[in-house]
Amino acid sequence: MNDNTEIDTEIQLAVFKAWTDRTLFYVSKMITEQIDEGEDYSVIKKCVNISILDFELFDDTKEFHSCFHLMEDKRHTLYSDKMEFHVIELPKLPTELKENSNDLLLWSKFLNSEREEEFKMLAEKNVYINKAYDKLQVISMDKQKQMEYTARQKELLDYNQLMKESKEAGYKDGQNKAALNSIKAGLTDDIIARITDLSLDEIKKLRTTIV
């Protein structure tokens, strides 16, 4: 994370009775592996485990999200904030969403969704979930569709970069420069014409200037 916090995110589908011991072991390793010979304890970064479970781990609560820290039993004084555990139990998710459902609940429902209409509904409620849904659709495409999507994304990125260069260099000079760069990049004349607004004849003339 930007604040140097290290995150360990895991999804477990089958029942794993020793899950708490497992996460404690791996978060402890995350901490001990941060210190090299000659360093002191000040280099230790906060380590957070996020467990997304498709089974119920705790029988003392109906809440789907639990968060744990190291703290004193009676006073609840925090011993250290360097270890933190989040557990999301998907079977405990509420069936219906309320109008003011928070992002954690929306994301959890998204991860637990199975039907197309559920994905679409959740994607409309959160811009980042919408982006994740777009990526999920790409992953679900067959090989040919993925290649077409990638090619289209590349074309759009090339267009944005070339337009930026055009504005910086002056419009006409920028048009020619963008066209030359596009030719060198192997783009077709039709695509270059859309990108630069140059005519096909102008583009053909520019091709003759490239040695």
Image (cartoon, rainbow, N blue to C red):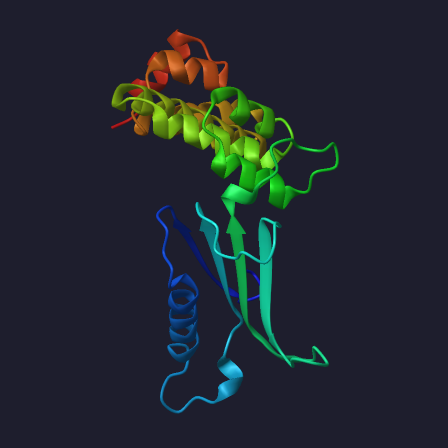
Residue 7 image point, x, y percent: 48, 61
Relative to 44, residue 68 above or below: above
Snapshot quadrant of residue 139 = top left
Residue 157 visible in the current orientation: no
Residue 26 visible in the current orientation: yes
Q: Please indicate whether residue 27 sits to the left or right of residue 208 in the image.
A: right
Residue 167 image point, x, y percent: 58, 31
Residue in the picture at 51% in, 29% down: 160
Q: Residue furthest bottom?
A: 38
Residue 191 image point, x, y percent: 39, 16
Relative to 125, residue 85 above or below: below
Q: Nearer the viewer, residue 202 or 125?
A: 125
Which part of the image, by quadrant, shows the C terminus? top left
Q: Nearer the viewer, residue 174 or 191?
A: 191
Residue 114 image point, x, y percent: 45, 28
Residue in the picture at 62% in, 26% down: 124
